[in-house]
Structure formats: C-alpha cells, structure tokens
Amino acid sequence: MSTYQLRSLHIEITPAMFSLPWSPFRKSAQHFQHQARLTMSGSVHALAVSNDGQALACGGTEGIKVWDIKSRKELTCTSHNYESRGTVSCAVWITARLAMTETLCYGTGLGYIVFLRRSPVDETCARRLGSGFEITCIAWDMSSEGSTRIAVGTRDKIVQVIVLSANSQLEAVFAVRLDNTVPKSVAFADDKGVYVFGLYDGNFIKLKNDDSAVVKEYSCKSVIGHAAVNQKRGVFVVDNATDGFTLYRLVGDEEPVRTFITAPPSISVPKQVAFGAEGRLVVGGSDNGLVYIFERKTGKLLETLHHSDAGLVQTIA
C-alpha cells in the first residue's frame, strides 16, 4: 500500500465550523484521523497553516483569529478593525529571512492588506491598496536580496507585486490591469515571474518579474474556482467548478493532464484545491460535505473525508 507524508489538513464549512484531520499514515485502511473541531462565529473564507505547522489562522466575516494547533487555544490578537476593513478574503503565512517569527499576511473585501506578527500576535502593517476593491488572492516569495515579495490580485482585474521591508514598510514593484481576467489565484514562478489564474475566463497567465509583461497566456477552458501550483512537479491544478479538479503542466503542452472526478456539484461555487505530500496528493473541497483526496500521478481517489452530512467545504489549507 502506498504511504504519504501529509502533515496536516484543515477544512471549513460555512457557517464557521471546521475540522482538523491529521494523518500519521500508519499502515491501516484509514489514512486520516480526525484531530479536532474548532468553531468561529460568522462565516469562514480563509484558512492558513503556519509553515512550521504550529499555528492556524482563520479569517472571515468576523475578522481574523489565530489558534495554537497543539493546544487548540486561541492566541490573543490586538486588531479589532475588521468592521471597517471588510471580510477577510485570503491569508498566507510568510517566513522572512531574518525574522524571529512568521508573519501572517491577509487581504480583505475592502482592499486592505494586513500583516500580523505571530509571537506575540500583533499588527505590524496595514494598507488599503488601490481603489479598495476586494483582495482575491495573495502569494509570497523571497527575493534574491532577501526581502519578501508579495503578489496580490484584486477584484478590479489588477495584479501587483509589493516588497515588505525589514521595518514593515511596503514598496511597489509593479501593478498591471489585466484586460479581461479577474485574478482568483496567484503564485510566484521559479524565475520570480508571477502566475495568474482567472476566475471567469479561466485564463492561465504568466507575468514577467520586473515589468509585468505577459509572457504566456492560454485558457483552461473552464472557470477557475481556485488554483494551486507545485513547482517541483511542474504542474498546477484548478477547481473547474463542474466535475472536479483539472491538472495542467506549467510548461509545454497546454492540454489537461487529467481530471480528478468528484460527485457532480449541485451548485456552482468556488472550491479550494491544494497539493499535499510534496505534490503526490491533490486535495479539494466539495458542496456535499466531503473532502476529496486523490493520487496525483494516477488520478485515483484515495479517500474522502467526511466533514458534514451536507453543505459547502470551500476552504482548505
């Protein structure tokens, strides 16, 4: 039997009740074991696990909360401005080269990008970007100079890259307005370019790292509810919002590699998808209370995790 090393998986259902399955991958028929269930008031739109696996950030209509995963205790947060900043729409943990702790970066529905220091949890920087449209996606990367680069997509079809300095100041690198693409997911390429995935037009775009010129663009022939990139395997996977999740190559052939088939959705809503076990697994949500786990190489459905009897499982991390 194949075994995989998957540290943790966190899923969410709206309203805000979410589970923490965990897998030590013992040699048994059950790969995953339910670890905990946490509750947050309001609906949840963003989950992010710290890079060391010790903290979970949860964001939604009630702002942002951070939990210690081992103790399952909520960590104190001094920020209480969520009413004026809008719903938390996306979040990611950043590991700066010289920083003592990780930093949480999250975006909101009213265009704010906010940075929280983890220990102790405290807000270090907040700025409203552009005209204040919803921040739909965030990604980060380390530059060759050691600074932290942040790629941000917004509802008004703008993708921009900013640098977070050591003293928590933001500096613009570039901003570009796309013709017809509302960015749903962004990711940095190995050459520091930026991958962009379009929500409605299903476009896959690569932007040049220094001047935002489009160096590659083609359609995935579906809307894109969410996308995840695995540089090591040279692939990306998208929620196609119809019959499951579709795998593509980052370079070369533009045709799909395979589709990971799920139960037909009863409603068309975006569902997050992610790679696990160093790219060997594809994990995605559903509208039927299940999380689907596939083997990337074969497309085989390995397991379904039961989160609820029905309802949306839209957010995973």
Image (cartoon, rainbow, N blue to C red):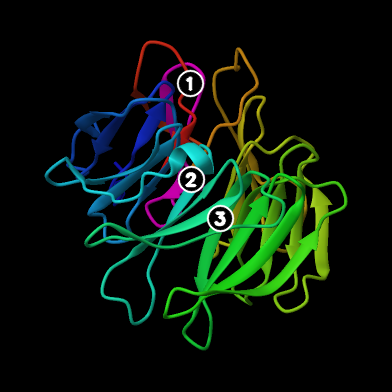
Residue 176 at x, y percent in the picture: 78, 63
- Amino acid marked by disc 2: Ala
Residue drawn 35% across the image and 16% down it: 308
Q: Quadrant of the C terminus?
A: top left
Q: Nearer the viewer, mark 2 or mark 3?
A: 3
Dot 2: element: strand
Place residue 81 in its image quadrant.
Answer: top left
Can you identify the residue that label 2 sits on? 274
Can you identify the residue that label 3 sits on? 138
Q: Which residues are magenta?
A: 275-298
Which mark sits nearer the N-terminus, 2 or 3?
Answer: 3
Residue drawn 16% across the image and 40% down it: 72
Which mark sits nearer the N-terminus, 1 or 3?
Answer: 3
Can you identify the residue that label 1 sits on? 312
Label 2 – label 3 distance at C-alpha: 15 Å
Q: Are marks 2 and 3 in contact (CB under 8 Å)?
A: no
In the displayed structure image, the side of residue 38 where residue 168 appears, left or right: right
